[in-house]
Amino acid sequence: DEQLMRDVPNSSWVVKDFISHLATIDEPVTRYFNSIRVAKVPSWDPPEGEPFHIHRFNHAMADERRERSVEDILAEAETKRAALLDELSQMDQPDLDLVINLGRRGSGDLRFGDYLKGLAHHDPMHAVDMMRAMPERLTPDIEAWFSHPAVAG
C-alpha cells in the first residue's frame, strides 16, 4: 500500500494512478481502432457526448480508482485489454496502411501500422515511470524489458 501511494518523480501521479491509467486507456483506444476499421475515419470522440480529452479522461480514471484494490483494477484491465486485442484481430492490411493524422499531438501524418509499433512501448514506458518511484523493485528481468531505445529514452 505504501508503494502504491508513492509520488512518481516528474509526475502529478502516484504509482497506483499509473496502474489505473494502464487499466483504463484500452477502452478509448479500442474505440479509436474501431473507427479506423469500420468507418476508415479515425476518431477518438465517442459516438455521443462531448469530444474526447485524453488528459481529462486519464485523470478522472485515476481519481475514480484511488480507493479500489489493485486486484480489481487489474481485473478491469484484463477485460479491456481483451476487447482491444479482439478489435486488433479484426483488422487487415488496408487498416494498417490507413494514414492517420496525429496533428493535435504534433506528430502529423502517420501510417496506422507504424502508430501501432510505437504504441507497443506504451505499457513499458509507464512501468519505467512506476519504477522511478520504487527503485528497490527493479529486477534484471524488468530492466531487460526496459532496454528498447523507445522505452529507455
Image: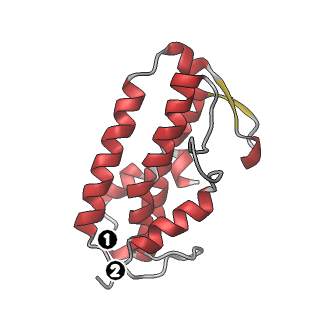
Q: Which residue is mark 2?
A: 3
* Residue 101 position (above or below residue 89): below
Category of crowding for the residue at label 2, using alpha-carbon neighbours closer than 10 angstroms: few (below 14), some (14–19), many (at least 20): few
Q: Residue at x 73, y 41 (%)?
A: 107
* Residue 130 position (above or below residue 6): above
Q: Observer-nearest residue: 133 or 34? A: 34
Amino acid on which the number 1 mark rests in the picture: Arg
* Residue 25 position (above or below residue 31): below
Compute the Cα span from label 1 to label 2.
10 Å
Could you say whether the residue bearing mark 2 is in a helix, strand or loop?
loop
Q: Residue at x 33, y 75 (%)?
A: 136
Is residue 74 visible from the viewing direction of this image? yes
Taking the image as shown, residue 33 lies to the left or right of residue 104, namely left
Find residue 69 and report its image quarter.
bottom left
Q: Which residue is mark 1?
A: 137
Amino acid on which the number 2 mark rests in the picture: Gln
